[in-house]
Amino acid sequence: MRRDGADALPPAAVLFDLDGTYADTAADMGAALNALLARHGRRPLPAAAIRPHVSNGARGLLKVGFGLAPDEPGYAELRAEYLTLYSADICRHTRPFDGMDALIATLVEQGLHWGIVTNKPGWLTEPLLAALAPVPPPACVVSGDTAARPKPHPDPLLYACALLEVEPARCWYIGDDVRDILAGRAAGMATLAAGWGYLGTGAPPADWGADAIATHPQAVLDRLLPAMSTPSSAPDAGSPGFA
């Protein structure tokens, strides 16, 4: 669990989840699901039904589309088919969320590192980020198969810290799923729930244990810059843009 109070260190890096936090991938991931449903004689699903499941990747989408869990017959074959469809058209509609480019530019101007830590496998993460071509590029990218265990384990976040040569206590992690907050807290980081993201279908973000819920990317900056010059780096949930 991260350090709080007067001994908290000012932030040196901000790490983002990918799907539903840095980038809005729902349209492309949903299109691949609907193409798969059509192949199997099923009706397409509306975007509103798909969107909450996108942060859970193929596992979440096959659950909502086909009612299948990973340990059930036919799941592995459908997953492979889905990922083939998705990878073939991975960045037709995907873009960074509004305000994200400006946020990252300011982070770098202030001398902070930024990076991506996602459960998306590397063979999908790399071409997607190459197509998005963020400027400036992330200082580190950690995918779901980079570290020994994916989120909610802290391994990927600690791996990112090692790449950046930054203490976990000087990192903030931002994500739109409870596993992001669990991973960040276990790694000893300050955590923000990305209220602009997909947010899943389980417990509401207020119950995740994040330090605050940022309702838009600019709210991250509103709290980050003051934290750089104050003794405590904990976000203030009472500020505008936070829940």
Image (spheres, rainbow, N blue to C red):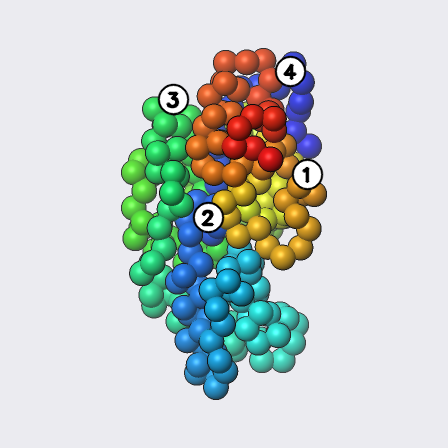
Q: Which residue is mark 3?
A: 110
Local crowd at mark 2 within 10 Å, few (<14), some, or many (≥20)?
many
Mark 4, mark 3: which one is toward the viewer? 3
N-term mark: 2 or 4 = 4
Three-letter amino acid code of the residue under disc 2: Leu
Separation of residues labelled 1 and 3 (CA atoms): 28 Å
Point 42% across, 52% down: residue: 24
| Figure check: 151 above or below 9 | below
Q: Which mark is residue 7?
A: 4
- Of mark 3 and mark 2, the one earlier in the sequence is 2
Where is residue 116, by image quadrant? Answer: top left
Residue type at mark 3: give it: Gln
Q: Position of residue 107 (x, y in %)?
A: 40, 28
Which disc is residue 18 wearing? 2
- Residue 96 x, y percent position in the rendering: 37, 46
Q: CA distance from mark 4 to mark 3?
A: 22 Å
Residue 9 position within the rendered picture, expressed as x and y whole percent measured from the top left: 57, 19
What secondary structure is marked by label 1?
loop
> Amino acid under label 4?
Asp
Checking the image for residue 209, the label placed there is 1
**Label 1 close to label 3 by CB (< 8 Å):** no
Relative to 104, residue 27 above or below: below
In the image shown, does 188 or 43 lie closer to the viewer?
A: 43
Please report the residue visible at 48 percent of the width from the left and 86 percent of the height from the top: 41
Quadrant where the image shows the N terminus = top right
Q: Which mark is residue 153?
A: none
